[in-house]
Image (tube, rainbow, N blue to C red):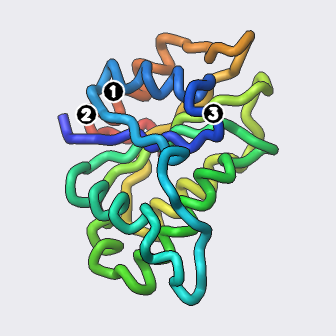
Amino acid sequence: MKKGVIILGSSNSNGTTKSIANFISTRTNFPIIDLKTKKIGEFDYEFKNRDDDFLPLIRHIVEEYQIVVFATPVYWYAMSGTMKIFFDRLSDCLKTEKETGRKLRGMEMAVVCCGCDQELKDGFYMPFKETAKYLGMRYMADMYCVEESGLPTIHEDEVESFLASIKDGHSVLS
């Protein structure tokens, strides 16, 4: 299996999204990087935040892993603010860190998210899919878990399909 990493983008390092990230981690041996423990500023057109944790983190990711699983809660029908800032900072890889950005090409991406609604609203995955397409990454799979009583609802068949796609490199998506 290819080496992968889980990027946790929640404001709660011990919440429901972390629970599902832990579950996936135990099944894949992918380490979890908690963005809340990193100092990552929002995108700056003058690139004044070059000394924060983003550039060393993204360099580490592109050098060490082939698969990135983004784990985010659903906040107001979208990815978390923490995750959005990380995605915005990918612009650094297009402007000043082009060598790092080019290394994203060919990598694989998957998304797992947790929310309170019984069904995820249409369009949630669009920023992930379009980012993958723009960067030349392969979008492999996504999975939505409903939070009930502080725990994610895990459907074994969905989990197995999700895990198979990231383990075997076969996208379950059209």
The x and y percentages for residue 74 are 70, 38
The x and y percentages for residue 78 are 72, 48
Residue 62 vertical placement versus 28 (above, below): below
Q: Are marks 2 and 3 in contact (CB under 8 Å)?
A: no
Q: Nearer the viewer, residue 174 or 14?
A: 14
Picture residue at 77% right of the left edge, 22% below the top: 118
Identify the residue under disc 3: 12
Identify the residue under disc 2: 168
Circle 3 crowding by C-alpha within 10 Å: few under 14, some 14–19, many from 20? few
Picture residue at 59% right of the left edge, 80% below the top: 44
Q: Is residue 136 visible?
A: yes
Circle 1 crowding by C-alpha within 10 Å: few under 14, some 14–19, many from 20? some
Q: Quadrant of the N terminus?
A: top left
Q: Amino acid at mark 3?
A: Asn
Q: Nearer the viewer, residue 170 or 3?
A: 3
Task: State which tag comes first along the sequence, 2 or 3.
Answer: 3
